[in-house]
Image (tube, rainbow, N blue to C red):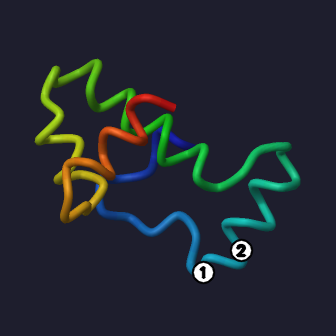
């Protein structure tokens, strides 16, 4: 299924649904953001691109995701 998802497709339509589905799989929904942040950094080696992808205003928030 993941292969058919395009960059701007919505996978979950609400926070509640995301949290419920994540819980079923045994993780917290912010774990997905942490994984995304680290994956983007591995690809680009750019904290600024990670910041942009996550939609953070402050770099300090992005650094939290990369350190976790």
Residue 20, given in percent of the width and then of the height, sits at: 80, 67
Point 64% across, 55% down: residue: 29
Point 72% across, 66% down: residue: 19
Find numbered disc 2 in the image and state the secondary structure of the residue it sits on.
Answer: helix
Find numbered disc 1 in the image and state the secondary structure of the residue it sits on.
Answer: loop
Point 42% across, 41% down: residue: 65
Counting every numbered tag in the picture gives 2
Residue 3: numbered disc: none
Q: Quadrant of residue 45?
A: top left
| Disc 2 crowd, CA 10 A, few/some/many (<14, 14-19, 20+) | few
Residue 17: numbered disc: 2
Question: What whole-number distance in Å separates the C-alpha atoms at marks 1 and 2?
Answer: 5 Å
Split into 4 quadrants, where in the image is the N terminus? Answer: top right
Q: In the displayed structure, does residue 8 sit left or right of residue 65?
A: left
Residue 42, given in percent of the width and then of the height, sits at: 29, 18
| Disc 1 crowd, CA 10 A, few/some/many (<14, 14-19, 20+) | few
Residue 25, given in percent of the width and then of the height, sits at: 83, 45
Asked if the residue under mark 2 is in contact with the one under mark 1, i.e. CB atoms within 8 Å, the reply is yes
Point 48% across, 48% down: residue: 33
Q: In the displayed structure, does residue 18 sit left or right of residue 42?
A: right
Q: Quadrant of residue 8?
A: bottom left
Return the residue at label 1: 14
Residue lying at the far front in this picture: please name it.
60
Residue 56, given in percent of the width and then of the height, sits at: 25, 61
Q: Is residue 51 above or below residue 44?
A: below
């Amino acid at each position: 299924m993941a292969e058919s998802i395009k960059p701007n497709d919505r996978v979950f339509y609400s926070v509640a649904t995301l949290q419920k589905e994540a819980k079923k799989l045994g993780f917290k929904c912010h774990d997905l953001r942490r994984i995304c942040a680290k994956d983007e950094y591995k690809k680009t080696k750019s904290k600024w691109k990670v910041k942009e992808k996550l939609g953070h205003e402050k770099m300090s928030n992005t650094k939290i995701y990369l350190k976790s």
